[in-house]
Amino acid sequence: MLNSASRPAASRPAQAPLQVVFATTEVAPWSKVGGLGDVMGALPAALAARGHRVMTVAPRYAAYKDAVDTAFRAALGAALRDAHSAFCIHNLAYQGGLPLTAFGRLCLPRSARAALEWPQPTGSSSDRGDMAGGAADSAGVGPATEGLGVERPRPECAPSRVDMANGQHNEAALSLNWMHAALAESDAVLTVSPTYAREICEDTDMACGMQRILRARGVRGIMNGLDVCEWDPATDAMLPARARFAAAEDAARGKAAAKRAAQRRFGLTADPSAPLMVYIGRLTGQKGVDVILSAAPALLGPAPGVPPLPPCAGPPSPDAAAAAAEVDTDSAEASSARSAGIATFREEAAHLLVAAADFVLVPSRFEPCGLVAQAAVRYGAVPIVAPVGGLADLVVPGVGYQMGCDPDAVAAGGAQAHRAAVRALTAAAAVALRDFATPRHAALRARCLALDVSWDRPAAEWEAALYAVAASQ
């Protein structure tokens, strides 16, 4: 599905090529909610460019115009014969698909004993994780079918003993959590930045109750890369031709042209000397959009040289709507010519905004990697970030501005933490504005443009990690 000719060539591995399959819920450009889609659109191609045989498996959510039917068909039983597999009952009642009383009857009947491999405290299990299950009738009784012909004792799994209502892992009670099971059974655990790897092993809330197994297994953080062919200010087809630039020396001209286009498109006052701050992301609490909205009165104050409210790209959510309702209406109306919001996502708008931006705001409460910040530095927009996850790894001194608040306080939530985050964002933005249009800002932009945010180094690290797993088998 990816055009390998558009990707930079890489040397073939010294060892035998690997066969790698990525299973994902998103893969850009066909399906994308956030960074996962971008990564799955680029990392497999980067590994393939290194000489490996790579396949990406994802749901086909729609009839994509460039999808090709390979005519390949395989029986599920044959595909799983030598693989570990899991049995999952999806409680459709929580999505409105069934009556709320249905799940109580949809249990694994005692007479059937579904062939789930139950992890023992000793960690022992059979060599194969084959399983099968039968459909229960309305009384909760029915046959179980052994799909792969293996007979073994099968533990009982019923709602009275196991909490299947949500994915939260509870180490104090018997519960099913598929992420916890995957962590226990995997050969290696990788995540998308070194700082995030440390955070989920050390912070109880960040680990969603799974810090014990994460610490026991160990987590390696490999910083994501960016598709530098798609995100290339020299060739970006989503930008006006005059806004493209190939060298750092030409960045000021190209970004000025992009700023003019953005101000015109989004109804902002046409002012080439006004600093432009941009936010691109989902309208959720995790991304800190409520922090930006609460800081808006300060950012849109009467002092000269204050930037417009960051344009927002992403679907609205209840918490964002509540935060938006708290913004002072008079202030928002008075600043309408200096602020704009876009409650939808358009890829070409995101490209124009990072090209036009002088600063990109990423005040996330947690952020595994932070691809928006990577796109920002690629286009010479200086990031202003919360020092969490991959943002702390990328935006070091001399590259951008870190909010001076405690990451633990930001992640904790509550009114006090929210106020602290707003103060920290306002203070960081004030420093950035003082630097704007000075030699320091030009130096920051040059350092951003000089960063290597490609997949070259991350793909090599992924390759080394996969070879290590293969060697351990």
Image (spheres, rainbow, N blue to C red):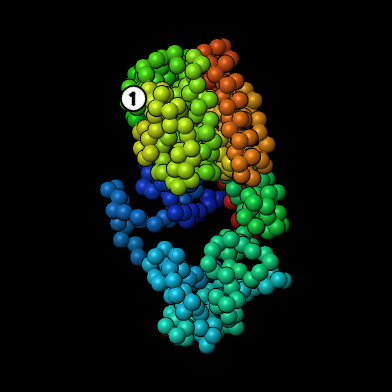
- Residue 444, compared with residue 34, is above or below; it is above
Q: Is residue 450 visible?
A: no
Left or right of residue 11: residue 126:
right
Nearer to the camera, 302 or 388: 302
Left or right: 84 in relation to 234: right
Which one is nearer the viewer's eye here, 186 or 242?
Answer: 242
Q: Amino acid at mark 1?
A: Gly
Task: Decide if residue 200 is in sight here.
Answer: yes
Q: Is residue 406 above or below residue 92?
A: above
Q: Decide which of 299, 315 is in the foreground and name it.
A: 299
Name the residue carrying label 1. 267
The spot of residue 181 in percent (x, y) is: 60, 64
Name the residue: 49% across, 69% down.
88
- Residue 147 lies, in percent from the top left, at 46, 79
Count how many numbered circles sit on residues in the image.
1
Q: Point out the image quarter for the C terminus.
A: bottom right
Between 221 and 89, the one nearer to me in the picture: 89
User: SS class of the residue under badge 1?
Assistant: loop
Q: Is residue 177 left or right of residue 21?
A: right
Q: Residue at x 68, y 52 (%)?
A: 204
